[in-house]
Image (cartoon, coloured by chain):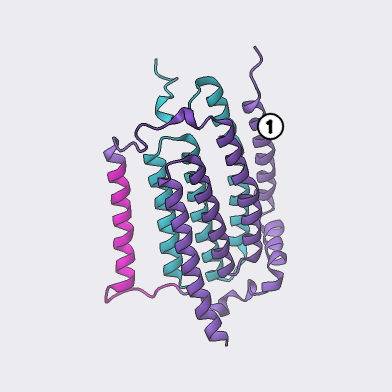
Chain colours: A cyan, B purple
Amino acid sequence: MPSMNSVLLISFLLFSIGVVGVLIRRNALIILMCAELMLNAANLNLIAFARHSGTVHGQAFALLVMGLAAAEVAVGLALVVALYRKKSTIQVDELDLLKG
Amino acid sequence: MEQSLAVIGSHLFLVFGLLALGGAATMVFARSAVHSVVGFLFCMLALASCYLCLGAEFLATAQILVYAGGIVVLFLFVVMIVELSKYKEQTRFQLHTPWAVGLVVAGAAAFIAVFWQTYFSPSAPQALTLDPTLAQGLDVANQNAQAISRGLYADFLLPFEILSVILLVALVGAVVLAKAERT
């Protein structure tokens, strides 16, 4: 069994790569992928703690998170496509529709 | 035999975890969007292997099915629809928000400090271990799916139903959003 510390460290690093990606990239697609990455890092933690506590609840919850991630991707990609239709770009800093 | 298997398992976890980190880094720092998607795919497959090392067989399979089979293909489709040549990023990264980067660095530093404390300080609290004997309930390794279904349908029935409604709403919403506007 891997030690809990290594699991936590890897999931933390994955999560922070996701945060960094959301903050520094300007391509909406890659921002969406980074959000997925963060959800997966959380999933890794859930599974590790399920293993630690010896119950199956963490794994069941990770499954729910996975389904939610799929729903999020569907809506997010539809938004990206709609944005591209309207503005012909998916660079997030060129989208200033709310600016008065 | 058991002992050596456990050691191999923990090393395999580290190997796959590092591979996942590499895939994630490729995803964030790759120049072209297709390379990013491939890095994402690589990361998801490595994570599925990590789940396998943690004894979550069903979730590893679901991860491959949902991510490698579904989500990555969706991303590739959108990369195809959105003209790649059009969004040449002049500057790939927006580092003009230094406070955001500083916030991330501060958070990372805080976590590493806590981690360091638990690992190396003389008064380190007992680190959590993944005790195999604790995992008896999960260690129905060949019945992992059965155990999960019991947890999912007995204890998490309401969240499960809510999730199905969310999926339905997302389905309809995606169709409405992506539909061509009638002019």
Could you tell me which secondary element the residue under label 1 belongs to?
helix
In this rendered view, identify the residue nearer to me: B28 or B104.
B28
Tell me: residue A58, above or below residue B31. below
> At x 42% / y 31%, what residue is drawn?
B88
The number of numbered badges drawn on the structure is 1
* Image spot of residue A74 (x, y percent): 61, 38
Residue type, label 1: Val
* Image spot of residue B112 (x, y percent): 31, 61
Secondary structure mainly formed by the magenta segment: helix
* Image spot of residue B85 (x, y percent): 48, 30
> At x 66% / y 73%, what residue is drawn?
B141
> At x 52% / y 42%, what residue is drawn?
B34
In this rendered view, identify the residue nearer to me: B99 or B138.
B99
Tell me the magenta residue range: B101-128
Please give the chain letter of the residue carrying mark 1: B
- Residue that carries the numbered disc 1 in the rendered image: B172
